[in-house]
Amino acid sequence: MKKLLLLLVLVLPVFGFAQKKGKGGPKVFDVLIGTYTGAGVNSSKGIYVYRFYAERGELAYLSEVETSNPSYLAVTQDHQYVYAVNENNADGSGGVTAFKFDKTTGKLDLINTQKSVGSPAYVSVDKARKNVFIANYGGGNLQVFPINKDGSLGASTQTIQDIGKGPDQMRQQQPHVHSTVLSSDDKYLLASDLGTDKINVFRYRASKVPPLTPATPAFTSTAGGAGPRHSDFSPNGKFLYNVQEMTATITAFSYDDGKLKELQTVKMMPDDFKGINGAADIHVSPDGLFLYATNRGTANELLVYAIDPVSGKLTYVSRNKTDGENPRNFVIDPTGNFILVGTKTRVNVFNINKTTGKLTQNHNNTLLLDSAVCLKMVPVE
């Protein structure tokens, strides 16, 4: 693994750096980066933590911790604990691991691990720090793990197996649950299933065992063969946006107390695109005015859409090539000024024009890191 530390950052004290406060809120953040680990050209070993200075868009290395294939991360609302899935497919050792997190130093300390039923690809945690939810892509199910007072994970209290398949004979012969996203009020959990072209909706009651029950209706379907993957809510909770991996499409839904109504579906790629699609991640800007989504395959792009704040519908703005192939997950910093995108060989930093939503890549701040597949950002205090 290579770490590119910027010259300006090298002369600044990293540890004990006082968080700047004032207009616009925090300006210093910790970026937690999950990676794919393994032999060969991939030199990453686990989760990496960098300090991000949002006034300059610069990154400085803090720490790392070894863990196998932490391909998705979730951070508790109080920023004290981090949960990482271990996406191990071949040997059946997939699971979810709990870490204690010190945001001042960026240090992660292992607490414990629980095994999963299948290879997990996504993890989320509720605001009250009661439960962790994982999506087992390989097993076609989702699981719930209770959180103990010390942040450790208890044995799974619920496994929900999806059923069905889709029209794609290669990739949709069985369910493939790909994400578990909580509504803004933590009353519902929405699970995208790439294998069955469904977004399953569950009522969530943290005090109940089991805590999830099917909502009414229990699911919303996307187009056949689309492959729903990730979702994100608008800041006001009125709209949900879902990106579909196989067709590289985005569907806008209105959202009301667990109920979804399709508003619009847009293509990420032009009609004459002849390459391979692999749409991956989707996020709404902090002000709710723009939506961003990645497409891997042969496109390797980050796309920008404007959001109509009344209707929730999308209008195409621009597309941006990434340095490095396979742009998966990305994070928008809370100030709304930068996007950090993980690729196969590096983390790209883009400046955001908050008026137009358009992006300009800051090549000077590129971070060299193998297989950066998930990024999370928390303020430093």
Image (spheres, rainbow, N blue to C red):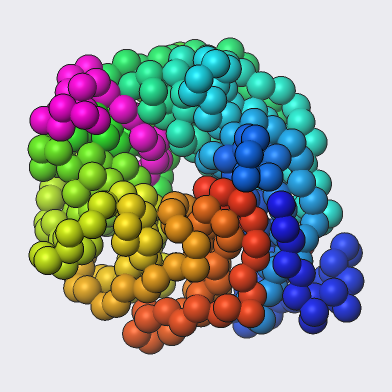
Q: Is residue 132 above or below residue 28?
A: above
Q: Is 209 on the left-hand or right-hand side of 32? A: left
Query: In the rendered structure, does residue 167 fall within the stretch colored magenta?
Result: yes
| Closer to us: 301 or 194 | 301
Residue 113 percent coordinates (x, y): 66, 21
Residue 282 percent coordinates (x, y): 36, 56
Q: Which residue lies at the image location 23% right of the left edge and 39% below the top edge? A: 227
Q: Is 79 on the left-hand or right-hand side of 92? A: right
Asked if residue 184 can be seen in this view, the reply is yes
| Closer to us: 236 or 20 | 20
Residue 266 percent coordinates (x, y): 15, 61
> Is the stretch drawn in magenta largely helix, strand or loop?
loop
Query: In the rendered structure, does residue 158 fall within the stretch colored magenta?
Result: no
Magenta region:
163-183
Asked if residue 81 can be seen in this view, the reply is no
Residue 141 percent coordinates (x, y): 36, 21
Q: Quadrant of residue 223?
A: top left
Q: Is residue 8 above or below residue 308?
A: below
